[in-house]
Image (tube, rainbow, N blue to C red):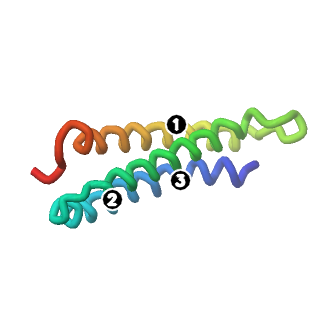
């Protein structure tokens, strides 16, 4: 249970760095080839991982009475869930260029 809380907490900054760093590195090759599916696939993968991380954090305190979370585990799990939701907002915001226009301009 503590592992799931810490995994949810640690996944958010890793996913944010992955979205920004790899997305920045993929813009030039994607624009030169004219194929933006690499960027869309990255955004979709990070969004799915972020939702999974948020669910993992959210489900820690809702376990059965035999596996009740301590105060610290509950805090870390809720913080991880919230951070993963913020990463999802980052993914949506950075993906607007793919939907509304082209990031190649």
Q: Quadrant of residue 30?
A: bottom left
Q: Are marks 2 and 1 in contact (CB under 8 Å)?
A: no
Instruction: Evaluate whether residue 80 shows in this view.
Output: no
Tell me how far mark 2 sits from mark 1, CA to CA: 27 Å
Q: CA distance from mark 3 to mark 2?
A: 22 Å
Q: Are marks 3 and 2 in contact (CB under 8 Å)?
A: no
| Residue 14 location (% of width, % of height) | 46, 57
Residue at left offset 19%, top offset 64%: 33
Q: Is residue 66 above or below residue 35?
A: above
**Viewer-nearest of labels 3 and 2?**
2
**Contact flag, marks 3 and 1 (Cβ < 8 Å):** no
Instruction: Estimate the spatial distance between the alpha carbons at disc 3 and disc 1, rounded to whole Å.
Output: 11 Å
Q: For residue 56, what is the image quadrant?
A: top right
Element on which disc 1 rests: helix
Q: Residue at x 38, y 50 (%)?
A: 43
Q: Nearer the viewer, residue 22 or 86?
A: 22
- On the image, numbered disc 2 is attached to which residue? 38
* Residue 66 visible in the displayed image: yes
To which residue does mark 3 refer?
11
Q: Circle 3: is it few (<14), some (14-19), or many (20+) Cα within 10 Å?
A: many
Q: Are there few (<14), some (14-19), or many (20+) residues within 10 Å of tag 1?
A: some
Give the foreground label among 2 and 1: 2
Residue at x-position 24% and y-position 58%:
35
Which of the 4 image quarters holds residue 76?
top right
Q: Viewer-proximal residue, 72 or 94?
A: 94
Badge 2 crowding class, 10 Å Cα cut-off, few under 14, some 14 to 19, many 20 or more, is: some
Mark on residue 82? 1
Q: Secondary structure at mark 3?
A: helix
Give how far across and how far down residue 12 sits, in percent. Answer: 49, 49
């Amino acid at each position: 249970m503590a592992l799931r809380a810490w995994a949810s907490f640690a996944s958010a900054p890793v996913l944010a760095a992955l979205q920004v760093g790899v997305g920045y590195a993929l813009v030039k090759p994607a624009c030169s080839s004219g194929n933006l599916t690499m960027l869309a696939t990255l955004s979709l993968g990070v969004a799915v991982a972020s939702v999974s991380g948020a669910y993992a954090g959210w489900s820690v305190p809702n376990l059965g009475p035999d596996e009740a979370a301590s105060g610290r585990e509950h805090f870390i799990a809720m913080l991880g869930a919230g951070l993963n939701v913020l990463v999802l907002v980052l993914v949506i915001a950075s993906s607007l260029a793919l939907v509304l226009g082209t990031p190649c301009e």
